Amino acid sequence: MKTRSGRNLVFSVLCLGLLGAFSAAGSADAQVMDDVSFGTVTVDQLELRNNKSGSNTINWDIQGWYGGDRDKFWVKTEGESSTNSNKEGEAELQLLYSRMVAPFWDMQFGVRQDLKFGPGPNATRTYAVVGFQGLAPYWFEAEPALFISDKGNVAARFQGTYDLLFTQRLIAQGRFETMAATKADPEFNIGSGLNNVGVGLRLRYEISRQFAPYVGVSWKRSFGNTADLARAAGNNVDNTSVNVGIRMRF
């Protein structure tokens, strides 16, 4: 039953991405500027997390792209590293090509490399990636994606953010993410079915559009087989953290 529920969630995430992409579509003659190439890098999160369930961590979520309105090349990375002497953590790097399929929506293809590091031998995993990234109705930024690993595991992830402006400089960002997998990968603490759900709220003050310090709070919980793996390793299945960081754009 857990495997079936995981597969259902995978298909639900993909359907959500497709629906968002095509519901956002307007005229097929939408103006593009393929003759002009430019780029940007956004450090969405670079923060210290005071975790209730364990050691403090440095967390990051960074992405950048270069190209025109229709075609772009993306680099994305996210992860965490503990601040204690063990220096354990996880990191992810994605290299992607994207094609605009509708106004405000890109379809992305590429590869993802995961690294788990710390005491003992490091572990790596490579994935093929297909996903969407864009702006859903009501200005909700969404990133549904499907991953197929070199071990044959199929996983789906959905990330979404929403910015609420109190003033032109004081902005609250809500964030939601969830992940599911069809097979377990104990080396990366991934179980089959629904893996986890996380939510966060960060309040930033934009000193400029390029630099904004923020404070926030995050909560994440593991479910099903992933929670069982966490308990077997002596870890908690849920965590609440208070976060302090900066958001930058170049």
Image (tube, helix red, strand yellow):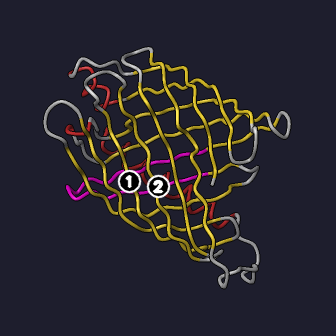
In the picture, the disc for residue 154 is: none
Secondary structure under badge 1?
Answer: strand
Measured as percent of width and height from the top left, residue 41 is found at 58, 56
Instruction: List the single residue furthest toward the top.
Output: 52
- The residue indicated by pointer 1 is 93
- Look at the image and tell me in which quarter the C terminus lies: bottom right
Q: Amino acid at mark 1?
A: Leu
Q: Amino acid at mark 2?
A: Lys
Residue 153 among those drawn in magenta: yes
Give the class, few, some or many, for how many residues have Cα within 10 Å of label 1's Cα (few <14, many ≥20): some
- Look at the image and tell me in which quarter the N terminus lies: top left
Q: Earlier in the sequence, mark 1 or mark 2?
A: 2
C-alpha gap between disc 1 and disc 2: 6 Å
- The residue indicated by pointer 2 is 76
* Magenta residues, dominant SS class: strand
User: Which residue is at 55% across, 64% downward?
Assistant: 65
- Residue 157, compared with residue 223, is above or below; it is below
Left or right of 233, for residue 129: right
Relative to the observer, which residue lies in front, 88 or 221?
88
Left or right of 128, for residue 102: right
- Are the residues flagged by discs 1 and 2 in contact, CB closer than 8 Å? yes
- Residue 102, compared with residue 177, is above or below; it is below
Left or right of 51, for residue 170: right
- Residue 2, compared with residue 134, is above or below; it is above
Left or right of 143, for residue 4: left
The stretch of residues the image draws in magenta is 142-160
Measured as percent of width and height from the top left, residue 155 is found at 35, 51
Give the class, few, some or many, for how many residues have Cα within 10 Å of label 2's Cα (few <14, many ≥20): some
Residue 11 among those drawn in magenta: no
